[in-house]
Amino acid sequence: GENVEQHPSTLSVQEGDSAVIKCTYSDSASNYFPWYKQELGKRPQLIIDIRSNVGEKKDQRIAVTLNKTAKHFSLHITETQPEDSAVYFCAASKGSNYKLTFGKGTLLTVNP
Amino acid sequence: DTAVSQTPKYLVTQMGNDKSIKCEQNLGHDTMYWYKQDSKKFLKIMFSYNNKELIINETVPNRFSPKSPDKAHLNLHINSLELGDSAVYFCASSNQVNQPQHFGDGTRLSIL
């Protein structure tokens, strides 16, 4: 089955800096890659997603890149703010089923 | 209106008891899911139903039994609760394969 590795497990940055979280996946058939943000005690919320026919997608301060050949994708957050502090999860799935396999999460702390 | 709602929000009970968690979505989605998030924040799929049909059944003990009376509801019944069942259980829903999953607020289950 699919295996998703996520790094780093914790990331601390200064307000205004950029943050990058990287994920690799094992199943070359995977074609949908969402990113979720989970604040403490809250539910995971989708922040951005990318499909395998696209190499990059951007939404304001958040961008995701996908390298299908290397089977890895990354989340980029620019001009970080304290409210960006949360656990971020990457995930992967393929069109033949509904199963979403999550990475183990990255705890991002943005220091004011 | 809450899109995916779970009840109860908190559940504290003793080992050996039987309990149920209910989930309802008003998004008109065809697919619903149960996830378990352990103390290390790892999100793992347990079950998924598509139009009341079970489509994902991961390696979960038989003590866990999902039931979907209609496509807007997915309940989870747990028999003979064990200490290791302590976790946050999230319900989610999506429309078709490879579409964003929307999560409920979670049910925090604590076994004494």
Image (cartoon, coloured by chain):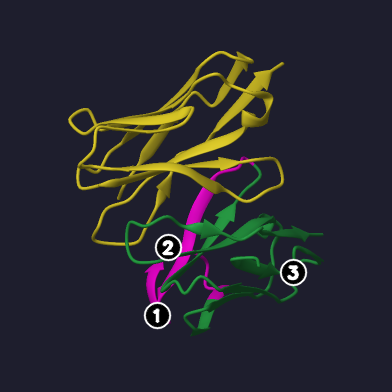
Element on which disc 1 rests = loop
Instruction: Determine if residue A104 is in view.
Output: no
- Which subunit holds the residue at mark 1? B
- Left or right: residue B102 compared with residue A63: right
User: How far across and how far down the image is residue B72, in percent?
Assistant: 52, 78
What chain letter is assigned to the residue under label 3? Answer: B
Q: Nearer the viewer, residue A40 or B57?
A: A40
The chain letter of the yellow chain reads A
User: Mark 1: which amino acid?
Assistant: Asn
Q: Position of residue B104 (x, y in %)?
A: 61, 61
Give the answer, above or below, for where A111 lies relative to B40. above
Residue at image point 59% right, 14% down: A16
Which percent across, then down, holds residue A76? 44, 25
Q: Where is residue B15 in the image (x, y as percent from the top left)?
A: 76, 66
> Does residue A64 appear in the picture of this structure?
yes
Q: Return the residue at label 3.
A: B8
A8 drawn magenta? no
| Mark seen at residue B51 | 1
Residue occupied by mark 2: B58
Q: Which of marks 2 and 3 is in front?
A: 3
State whether discs 1 and 3 lie on one chain. Answer: yes
- Cα–Cα span, label 1 and label 2: 18 Å
> Which region of the structure is painted magenta?
B40-65
Q: Chain B is drawn in which colour?
A: green
Q: What residue occupies the far bottom of the structure in this picture?
A: B69
Kindly identify the amino acid type of the residue bearing the numbered disc 3: Pro
- Give the alpha-carbon distance from disc 2 to disc 3, as whole Å: 24 Å
Instruction: Reply yes or no: does residue B54 show up in magenta.
Output: yes
